[in-house]
Image (cartoon, rainbow, N blue to C red):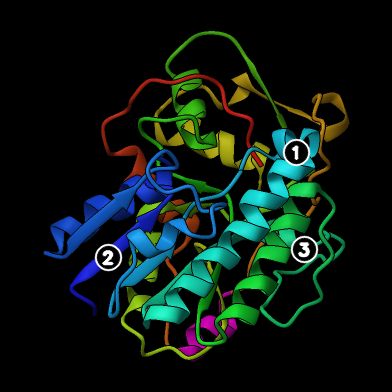
């Protein structure tokens, strides 16, 4: 494992958790926010990346509806930016791990998507993230793409689980889509996998990382309420069409880790087990999210 870990998008939930874990493991950490390293600037990377570094690109425009409203910004950040990072890493001899998404898939499948399954993104967000994957591997064939799904911390922040946790602690009902299915992924498990990949012993160009199993957003919300001892009947199922969203979401985007585990990643634990651990951590505040 390299001595120094360089993180882009360090203000986001994955970047923040990754930076903290890297420091805990004793690495020299350079955690850079968008203000410090704008990855859309092709010359900026030379100020931050050196030979032997592990660079983890967490920078992205992740708000799916914002991406739909501003496709040029989404393409610059999600497609061109990662290419700039990859060129910089290739130039100096740094290792690169690039974080991508389950939204590169169409959702037409009804069993978990494995690495070799056909992509077909529905939204600007998904299309620009897929372009980013391709640009990274074209610029740096030995980079690693890590696709993940429905990432949450469950504590402080605006992720789905954190919001449902706050709703569970309040009064009233909450309406949640029951026709979107994915693989909830606890950020701790994703970050552990990113470190495994960063060690350089896995040669697959694309990997999937998600907790085992699949559920709907409605089932996930009810699980949060159940874990916290709240009345699950307060979670009401609705269709996606009843929730105003600018961008389409795949109806099914659960990820399979079969190929990833075969390649050397630690087998994932069930999503309910990970959720219980996340909800045992202190809660935080925040606003309602625009969740993917």
Number of dots carrying numbers: 3
Q: Earlier in the sequence, mark 3 or mark 2?
A: 2
Q: Nearer the viewer, residue 74 or 185?
A: 74
Residue 109 visible in this rendered orientation of the protein: yes
How packed is label 2: few (under 14 Cα within 10 Å), some, or many (20 or more)?
many
How packed is label 3: few (under 14 Cα within 10 Å), some, or many (20 or more)?
many
Instruction: Identify which residue is drawn at 48% across, 91% down.
Output: 203
Q: Nearer the viewer, residue 55 or 36?
A: 36
Q: Quadrant of residue 11?
A: top left
Label 2: which residue? 5
Q: Earlier in the sequence, mark 3 or mark 1?
A: 3
How packed is label 1: few (under 14 Cα within 10 Å), some, or many (20 or more)?
some
Q: Earlier in the sequence, mark 2 or mark 1?
A: 2
- In the displayed structure, does residue 147 sit left or right of residue 154? right
Label 3: which residue? 105
Establish if 23 lies above or below 141.
Answer: above
On-image quarter of the C terminus: top right
Instruction: Identify which residue is drawn at 76% across, 36% down.
Output: 70
- In the displayed structure, does residue 143 sit left or right of residue 18? right
- Secondary structure beneath disc 2? strand
Our reading of the magenta stretch's main secondary structure is helix
- Secondary structure beneath disc 3? loop
Residue 212 visible in this rendered orientation of the protein: no
On-image quarter of the N terminus: bottom left
Residue 48 at x, y = what percent?
33, 60
- Secondary structure beneath disc 1? loop
CB atoms at circles 2 and 1 under 8 Å apart? no
Q: Which residues are magenta?
A: 257-263
Residue 179 at x, y = what percent?
79, 43
Label 1: which residue? 178
Residue 211 at x, y = what percent?
49, 62
């Amino acid at each position: 494992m390299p001595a120094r870990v360089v993180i882009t998008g360090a203000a986001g939930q994955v970047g923040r958790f990754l930076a903290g874990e890297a420091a805990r493991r004793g690495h020299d950490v350079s955690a850079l926010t968008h203000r410090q390293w704008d990855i859309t600037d092709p010359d900026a990377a030379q100020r931050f990346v050196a030979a032997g570094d592990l660079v983890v690109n967490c920078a992205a425009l992740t708000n799916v509806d914002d991406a739909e409203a501003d496709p040029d910004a989404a393409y610059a950040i999600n497609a061109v930016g990662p290419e700039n990072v990859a060129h910089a890493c290739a130039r100096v001899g740094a290792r690169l791990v690039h974080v991508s998404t389950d939204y590169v898939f169409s959702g037409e499948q009804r069993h978990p998507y494995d690495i070799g399954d056909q992509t077909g993104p529905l939204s600007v967000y998904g299309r620009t993230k897929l372009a980013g994957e391709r640009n990274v591997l074209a610029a740096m064939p030995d980079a690693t793409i890590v696709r993940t799904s429905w990432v949450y911390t469950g504590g402080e922040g605006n992720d789905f689980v954190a919001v449902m946790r706050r709703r569970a602690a309040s009064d009233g009902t909450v309406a949640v889509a029951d026709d979107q299915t994915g693989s909830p992924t606890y950020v701790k498990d994703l970050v552990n996998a990113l470190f495994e990949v960063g060690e350089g012993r896995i040669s697959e160009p694309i990997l999937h990382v998600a907790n085992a199993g699949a559920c709907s957003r409605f089932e996930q919300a009810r699980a949060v309420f159940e874990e916290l001892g709240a009345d699950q009947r307060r979670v009401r199922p609705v269709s996606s069409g009843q929730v105003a969203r600018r961008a389409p979401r795949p109806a099914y985007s659960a990820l399979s880790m079969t190929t990833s585990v075969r390649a050397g990643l630690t087998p994932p634990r069930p999503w309910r087990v990970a959720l219980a651990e996340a909800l045992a951590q202190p809660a935080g505040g925040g606003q309602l999210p625009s969740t993917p």
